[in-house]
Each structure stands twice: as structure tokens, then as C-alpha cells.
């Protein structure tokens, strides 16, 4: 599958039927999901791997990972309505390698090869992304995540990763489109800048050396 085809396929999936602002339910746009997944795929972090998608929402990242050859994806999502949409999206493409888990991300246990996630950015609940990063760093040695491209967010993300024994190996900045979906949205389409990160666990002694 080509990258452009992946982005297009993912952008056609169903969105949140009733987006909930307090959970920051913004579907991951096709271009952003494809960037994250393509990077992961090119670095050997998808094919044949066991993965977790934390805050899976409508399943965009989980579905994309399966299309690129993941062996199994745990899609963890607190909102059952969103998870129902994720199930429909997977079924519409005949994908059956996703295990849907209706739970808070903090409750997920197990080990995976790779975590992929588009966590809440923390605009409604401050530091909502912290529990996602913490869980990701607990269950995997390789983590892909999306955060706001702002200096203070970068500082937080990078220092939090380092405190948890991880380092940033890749970061790319992209435009993320949010169509108006909540009453507090003034514009028809909001464009924000986001960073797609790849983190890997430092080998023993590496963190101190840096
Ligand atoms: N990647 C998804 C959703 C991103 S939005 C997509 O593209 O559709 C972030 C998601 O995290 C939302 O679906 C929200 O319901 C979920 N979420 C927020 N807090 C959560 C928590 N504590 N545990 C699990 N999921 C959570």
C-alpha cells in the first residue's frame, strides 16, 4: 500500500458520532495518521508487531497499523460509543487483528512492541497527555505520539520522556485540521501545528551519558 493511498483510506473512515469535548475527541486526520504510521513502518515498528493504540477513538491508527501488517493491535478507549465506531471502521475494511478494550488507558496492562497514540492534547483537562505517556513508557520500548507543536509542550514532552528513561529519535511537525464540532469552535476549520514523535527506551547507561 502506498502512503497516499493509506492517508486517503484513513480519511474516509467514520468520525466520532457524538464527539465529547471533555475527552478531546478529535479524529486523527488521514495525513497525520499516515505520517506517524509510515514512519513507524519504515523503521520496522509495525510489520509483524504487537501494538497498542492508547485512546483509540474511531480506530484510525489501529486500522492503519493493521493495513501495514501489524500482527495484533490493542485498541484501548474509555468511550464505548467511540469504540463502536472503531469496530465498524475495522469491519468495513475486513480487518480482524484489533482487540478492542473499553477501559481507561491507565488500566491497560501487558507488553507490546510498539505504542501508537494521538492522546488528548490537554486543552480541556490540563496534562491529560501525561497519563498516556506514562502508560506508553510502561508497556513498550518504542512509542509514537502526537502533541501540540508549542515550545512549552515540547519542553514538557521531552523532559517527561527523559525522566522516564526515553529519548526522542524523530520529531516532525505537521498541520492538523480540526473541523468545527463543538459550540466553542468559532471557525469552520481550525488548523493547528502538531509534532509527531518517536521515543525509544534508552539502553542501560545511555540516559546518563547524554
Ligand atoms: N486516535 C483517535 C482518537 C484521538 S482523540 C482517532 O483518530 O479517532 C483522543 C481519544 O482518547 C478520544 O477518543 C478519547 O475518548 C480518548 N480518551 C481520553 N481520555 C482517555 C482515557 N483516560 N483512557 C482511554 N481513552 C481516553
Image: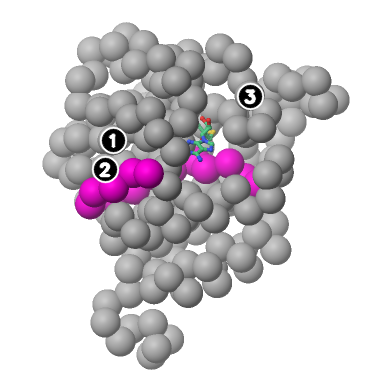
- Of the image marks 2 and 3, the number of the one nearer the N terminus: 3
* Res. 74 mark: 1
In which quadrant will I find the C terminus? bottom left
What whole-number distance in Å separates the C-alpha atoms at marks 2 and 1? 6 Å
Above or below, 166 against 137 in this view is below
Could you tell me which residue is drawn at 80 percent across and 26 percent down?
A: 185
Query: Tag 2: Cα neighbours inside 10 Å, few (<14), some, or many (≥20)?
Result: many
What's the magenta bit mostly, secondary-structure-wise?
loop
Coordinates of residue 192 in the picture (x, y in percent): 69, 40
What stretch of residues is rendered in magenta? 107-122
Residue bearing the label numbered 2: 51
Question: Do the numbered discs 2 and 1 sit on residues whose CB atoms are within 8 Å?
Answer: yes
In which quadrant will I find the N terminus? top left
Residue lying at the far right of the rendered structure: 186
* Res. 158 mark: none
Q: Nearer the viewer, mark 2 or mark 3?
A: 3
Instruction: Give left or right: position of 151 versus 55.
Output: right
Residue bearing the label numbered 3: 20
What whole-number distance in Å separates the C-alpha atoms at marks 2 and 3? 26 Å
Q: Secondary structure at mark 3?
A: loop
Could you tell me which residue is drawn at 29 percent across and 11 percent down?
A: 91
Query: Tag 3: Cα neighbours inside 10 Å, few (<14), some, or many (≥20)?
Result: some
Q: Is mark 3 within 8 Å of ligand 1?
A: yes
- Of the image marks 2 and 1, the number of the one nearer the N terminus: 2
Coordinates of residue 23 in the picture (x, y in percent): 60, 33
Q: Secondary structure at mark 1?
A: strand
Above or below, 141 against 177 in this view is below
- Of the image marks 3 and 1, the number of the one nearer the N terminus: 3
Amino acid at each position: 500500500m502506498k502512503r497516499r493511498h493509506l492517508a486517503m483510506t484513513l480519511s474516509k473512515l467514520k468520525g466520532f458520532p457524538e464527539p465529547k469535548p471533555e475527552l478531546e475527541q478529535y479524529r486523527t486526520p488521514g495525513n497525520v495518521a499516515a505520517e506517524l504510521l509510515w514512519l513507524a513502518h519504515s523503521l520496522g515498528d509495525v510489520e509483524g508487531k504487537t501494538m497498542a493504540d492508547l485512546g483509540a477513538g474511531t480506530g484510525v491508527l489501529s486500522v492503519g497499523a493493521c493495513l501495514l501488517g501489524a500482527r495484533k493491535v490493542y485498541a484501548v478507549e474509555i468511550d464505548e460509543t467511540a469504540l463502536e465506531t472503531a469496530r465498524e471502521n475495522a469491519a468495513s475494511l475486513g480487518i480482524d487483528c484489533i482487540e478492542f478494550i473499553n477501559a481507561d488507558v491507565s488500566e491497560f496492562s501487558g507488553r507490546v512492541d510498539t505504542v501508537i497514540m494521538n492522546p488528548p492534547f490537554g486543552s480541556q483537562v490540563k496534562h491529560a497527555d501525561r497519563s498516556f505517556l506514562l502508560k506508553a513508557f510502561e508497556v513498550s520500548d518504542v512509542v509514537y505520539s502526537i502533541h501540540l507543536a508549542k515550545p512549552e509542550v515540547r519542553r514538557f514532552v521531552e523532559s517527561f520522556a527523559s525522566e522516564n528513561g526515553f529519548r526522542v529519535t524523530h520529531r516532525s511537525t505537521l498541520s492538523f485540521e480540526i473541523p468545527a464540532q463543538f459550540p466553542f469552535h468559532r471557525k469552520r476549520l481550525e488548523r493547528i501545528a502538531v509534532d509527531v514523535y518517536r521515543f525509544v527506551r534508552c539502553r542501560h547507561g545511555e540516559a546518563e551519558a547524554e
